[in-house]
């Protein structure tokens, strides 16, 4: 079948017109997609440039130190928020376990008393019940563990301030099960030191200025050669300038009633504080010091005065040895010597006071075998000139003791010690009682 010539001409023309109309539309659609793509690329470039700028700025800043995992700080602020800016804080002390076996010739020391925990000459029984002696007895305790808190501050002008509080657990309990060995062995916190110092001034409770702490021997026992040692902590105001120091300290009078040494008591009637003065010199060779004490005693309306002198020191004998010593004596030295083994005053039949004369001292040799092992040998004694017409024959006339120890430090700040002691107390009627003790301890200081 043949087609009409006109139709043959119209078909190619229609196809051409259709193509002509489609090509610009396709070209226009392609142009819109390219524009969208270009816009997306431009946005990505902007984001990348911003990221590079941020990284460059961070690289220019010092990097903060990395905190290891598990080592995050306990707190982000100061532990003393109320202190002056720049104040430093310290926490010190030690944990100590004491274990001892004691044998006394004239009866046992009362359970729970201080003499069961450390060497106290006045607690040695003399001529009491069971004076024929008895079996040894054992005591364990950790009451002398202690802690101390200190704050120090120096002002812009160079003024130095210090505050210090220290306590141990040598105190009674607060309930029926506490303070004894029945169940919990719980003991109360006991104040040792609490003072503030400002440059040369000190106010508060601490060691008496009449006491030479630096001369105390390296003992396993709480003190060791207690018999001849001045040992007092009390409230005071002290001024120190160079080698000199003076203080006004808490007064107290220990009274021996007429013919009744066993009934001794503290009067609490004092008005004037105890006055002390000390001179100290020291160097690589050790130290030497002299201290004086002037006191007023008072009971009811009666008064008396007394004075005492203390000379002590430490001499280094080479790198491994030293000698520590003290000589103390005077009228009314009573409560300052050997935990108050003697009275300050005795009362006569008319109620008048008479200061008691007494003296004592100690010497100790320390030898270091190695950084881990050291030993100490100690001897101490005290003596009181009692007027038996006033005190009676039950007053303590003299005491003495020997001590030897070996201390092993397997690690720094950890001491394992053992000490053997022999002590003796004698009365004016010539009766005597003695003490034998093996004292061991483990002590970790921080």
Image (cartoon, rainbow, N blue to C red):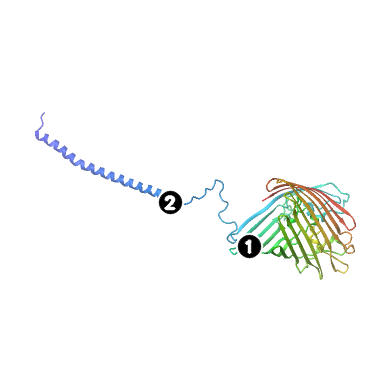
Residue nearest the viewer, comparing 410 with 325: 325
| Residue 212 location, quadrant | bottom right
**Does residue 439 appear in the picture of this structure?**
no
Residue 395 placement (x, y as % from top left): 86, 59
Q: Which residue reaches farthest top?
A: 1
Left/right placement of residue 413 relative to residue 9 reads: right
Q: Which mark is residue 254?
A: none
- Badges 1 and 2: C-beta atoms under 8 Å apart? no
Q: Which residue is drawn at 19% across and 42% down?
A: 21
Which residue is pictured at 69% across the width and 51% down the height? Answer: 94
Q: In this orientation, does residue 94 appear?
A: yes
> Where 431 sits versus 297, above or below?
above
Q: From the image, tell me which residue sits under label 1.
A: 160
In the rendered image, residue 56, in percent from the top left (x then y), is placed at 42, 49
Front residue of 177/332: it is 332
The quarter of the image holding the N terminus is top left
Q: Which of marks 1 and 2 is nearer the N terminus?
A: 2
Circle 2 sits on which residue? 57
Q: Position of residue 404 (x, y in %)?
A: 79, 48
Q: In this view, does 348 lie above or below 360?
A: below
Q: In which quarter of the image is residue 38?
A: top left
**Residue situated furthest left in the rendering:** 5
């Amino acid at each position: 079948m043949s087609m009409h010539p006109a139709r043959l001409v119209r078909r190619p023309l229609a196809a051409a017109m259709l193509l002509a109309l489609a090509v610009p539309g396709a070209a226009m659609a392609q142009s819109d997609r390219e524009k969208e793509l270009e816009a997306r690329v431009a946005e990505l470039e902007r984001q990348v440039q911003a990221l590079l700028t941020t990284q460059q700025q961070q690289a220019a800043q010092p990097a903060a130190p990395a905190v290891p995992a598990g080592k995050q700080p306990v707190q982000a602020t100061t532990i003393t928020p109320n202190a002056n800016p720049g104040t430093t804080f310290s926490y010190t002390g030690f944990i100590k376990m004491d274990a001892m076996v004691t044998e006394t010739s004239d009866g046992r020391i009362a359970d729970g008393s201080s003499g069961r925990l450390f060497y106290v000459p006045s607690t040695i029984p003399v001529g009491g019940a069971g004076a024929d002696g008895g079996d040894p007895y054992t005591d364990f305790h950790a009451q002398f563990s202690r802690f101390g808190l200190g704050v120090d501050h120096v002002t812009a002008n160079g003024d130095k301030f210090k505050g210090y509080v220290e306590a141990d657990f040598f105190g009674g309990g607060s309930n029926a099960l506490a303070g004894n060995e029945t169940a919990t062995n719980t003991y109360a916190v006991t104040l040792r030191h609490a003072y503030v110092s400002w440059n040369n001034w000190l106010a508060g409770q601490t060691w008496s200025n009449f006491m030479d702490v630096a001369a105390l021997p390296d003992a396993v026992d709480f003190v060791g050669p207690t018999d001849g040692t001045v040992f007092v902590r009390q409230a005071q105001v002290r001024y120190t300038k160079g080698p000199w120091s003076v203080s006004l300290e808490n007064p107290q009078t220990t009274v021996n009633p007429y013919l009744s040494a066993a009934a001794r008591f503290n009067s609490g009637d004092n008005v004037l504080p105890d006055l002390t003065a000390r001179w100290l010199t020291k160097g690589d060779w050790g130290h030497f010091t002299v201290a004086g004490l002037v006191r007023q005693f008072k009971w009811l309306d009666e008064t008396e005065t007394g004075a005492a002198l203390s000379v002590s020191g430490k001499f280094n004998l080479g790198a491994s040895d030293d000698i520590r010593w003290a000589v103390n004596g005077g009228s009314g030295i009573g409560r300052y010597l050997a935990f108050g083994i003697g009275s300050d005053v005795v009362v006569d039949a008319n109620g008048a006071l008479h200061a008691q004369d007494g003296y004592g001292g100690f010497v100790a040799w320390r030898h270091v075998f190695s950084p881990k092992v050291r030993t100490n040998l100690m001897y101490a004694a005290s003596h009181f000139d009692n007027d038996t017409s006033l005190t009676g024959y039950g007053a303590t006339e003299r005491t003495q003791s020997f001590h030897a120890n070996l201390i092993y430090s397997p690690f720094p700040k950890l001491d394992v010690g053992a000490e053997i002691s022999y002590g003796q107390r004698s009365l004016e009627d010539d009766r005597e009682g003695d003490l034998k003790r093996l004292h061991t301890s483990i002590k970790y200081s921080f």
